[in-house]
Amino acid sequence: MKVILSNGLSLRRVTWFALAVGCGLLMAQAQVADVRRDATVTAVERAMPSVVNIATTTVVDNTDPAFRWRAEFFGYRVRPQLAEVPSSVGSGVIIDETGYVLTNEHVVKGANRIWVKLMDGREIEAERVAGTRKTDVALLKMKTKEGDKFTPMRFAADDDLLLGETVITLGNPFGLGGSVSKGILSSKSRRPANEDSALDVADWLQTDAAINPGNSGGPLINVRGELIGLNVAVYREGHGIGFAIPIKRVNEALSRYFTP
């Protein structure tokens, strides 16, 4: 039986109208929510699982100097009082599913132990496989369990760079954990501020995305979530000037002992 309302509309017609309005509202809400998920957010979501925090420790001699002097004066041998202390924090990039990690050499140089913290909270000890001061690129290998798999970051093609394109830094600034900053690619061939630098990099990438202590070794990515550089330094005498080693130079440094 067809039900007719007092205003002449059928119940079926009213029901369909209500459903249409409800669906329209749901679609509108979904569209509003999606507005936030722009290219930057998508790139971060794609890249963040490959970003790690790095902490190192070194062994120091804590023997009291006065005690050492007195003991040596009277001809006694002194056994060093060794202690393991935190020495640096930085960032890194997983580049292979078996647990290889890319970072800066200065982050892990002289470290007695290296710890890698993943974005899911796991902490895994790692060892330095290779690295050079000249390029400031180091390769680590996490001490994984059999069957462990990790999410590697995709590399951009060498020289696939556009001046003014949006770039994103990911890392561990000041040891505070995972952080994101966005800027543009300001220069593709910036020389280090100190021409006497031991670093053999004549074409650093320059960006105004924030690169702070602890970001060293972290990734500089494009809006496709691809690695275009390795964060290395910030220019202390100017605001908004950070530098990264271009992926081309990173590949050259890695080519001797690893192919991602």
Image (cartoon, rainbow, N blue to C red):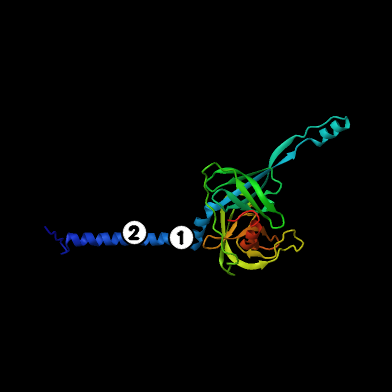
**Residue 253 appears at what percent x and percent y?**
66, 58
In this picture, is 234 found above or below 59? below
Residue found farthest to the bottom: 163
Amino acid bearing label 2: Leu
For label 1, the SS is loop
Please tell me which of labels 1 and 2 falls first in the chain: 2
Return the residue nearer the eye: 154 or 106: 154
Residue 161 in the image: state x and y as whole percent: 58, 67
**Drawn side of residue 163 relative to residue 69, left or right:** left
Q: Nearer the viewer, residue 114 or 18?
A: 114
Residue 111 horizontal side relative to residue 179, left or right:
right
Residue underneath mark 1:
37
Mark 2 element type: helix
The residue lying at 41 percent from left, 59 percent from top is 33
* Front-most of residues 36 and 256: 256
Residue named by callout 2: 26
* Relative image position of residue 74 (x, y in whole percent): 88, 29
> What residue lies at 85% left-to-right and 29% top-to-bottom?
76
Residue 197 position, x and y percent, is 75, 60
Residue 150 in sight in this render: yes
Label pair 1/2, CB-CB below 8 angstroms: no
Question: Is residue 172 among what the camera can see?
Answer: no
| Residue 253 to residue 147: above or below | below
User: What is the distance, in whole Å, between disc 1 and disc 2 at their CAs?
Assistant: 17 Å
Identify which amino acid the numbered label 1 is placed on. Answer: Arg
Query: Residue 104's quadrant in the figure?
Result: bottom right
